[in-house]
Amino acid sequence: MTVKTKKSTRGHGERRSRFETAFLSALLRKSTVAEAAREAGISDSTATRWLSDPAFKERLKSAQDEVINHSLSILKLSTSEALEVLRSVANDEVSPPSARVAAARTLLDNAFRSVELTDVLGRLEALEARTEEDEK
C-alpha cells in the first residue's frame, strides 16, 4: 500500500511573501524606494511593480497607519508631562521672567488652539449631519 504524503508547499509564494514583508518593513524606515528595495533584497523594478499592486498598497497603508497610531499614542502620553513642565516653569518664581512668560504663552496658545479645534469640529459635525439629512 502506497501512502501519499503532502509535499512541502515551500516555494516562490512563500519566498515572495518574505521579500514583501521585508520590503514593507524597509519602506517604513528608509527615505527612498530604492533604499528600501536594496535592503529587502529586491530589484527596483520589482519594488515598482509591487507598489502598483492594490493589495500591496493596502498592506503598506495599513502598516503606515499602525506606525502613525503608535507615534500618536506616545505623543498623547507625553502631553500631560509636557504640560506639567510648562506649568512648573510658568509658576516657578525663581525661573527667569522670560522663561515664565514663554511657558505661560505656550500654555495659553495651546489652550486657545484646543478651543478653536473643538469649535471647528463641532461645526463640521453639524454640517455633516445636515448634509446627511438633505441626502435622505
Image (tube, helix red, strand yellow):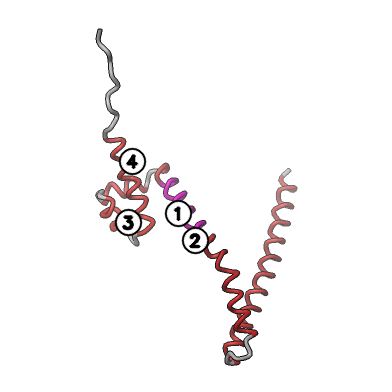
2 or 4: mark nearer the eye: 2
Q: Is residue 57 above or below residue 31?
A: above
Would you name the residue on which mark 3 appears? 33
Give the residue drawn at x 42%, y 42%.
55
Q: Magenta part mainly helix, strand or loop?
A: helix
**Disc 2 to disc 1, C-alpha distance:** 11 Å
**Disc 3 to disc 2, C-alpha distance:** 22 Å
Q: Magenta part of the protein: which range?
A: 57-72
4 or 3: mark nearer the eye: 4
Q: Quadrant of residue 28?
A: bottom left
2 or 1: mark nearer the eye: 2
Would you name the residue on which mark 4 appears? 17
Would you name the residue on which mark 2 appears? 71
**Disc 4 to disc 3, C-alpha distance:** 18 Å
Badge 3 element: helix
Q: Is 96 placed left or right of 71 in the picture? A: right
3 or 2: mark nearer the eye: 2
Few, some or many C-alpha atoms within 10 Å of disc 1 (few <14, some 14-19, many ≥20)? some
Q: Return the x and y of residue 85 as percentages of the image width and height.
A: 58, 77
Q: Is tag 3's residue or tag 1's residue first in the polypeptide sequence?
A: 3
**Which labelled disc corresponds to residue 64?**
1
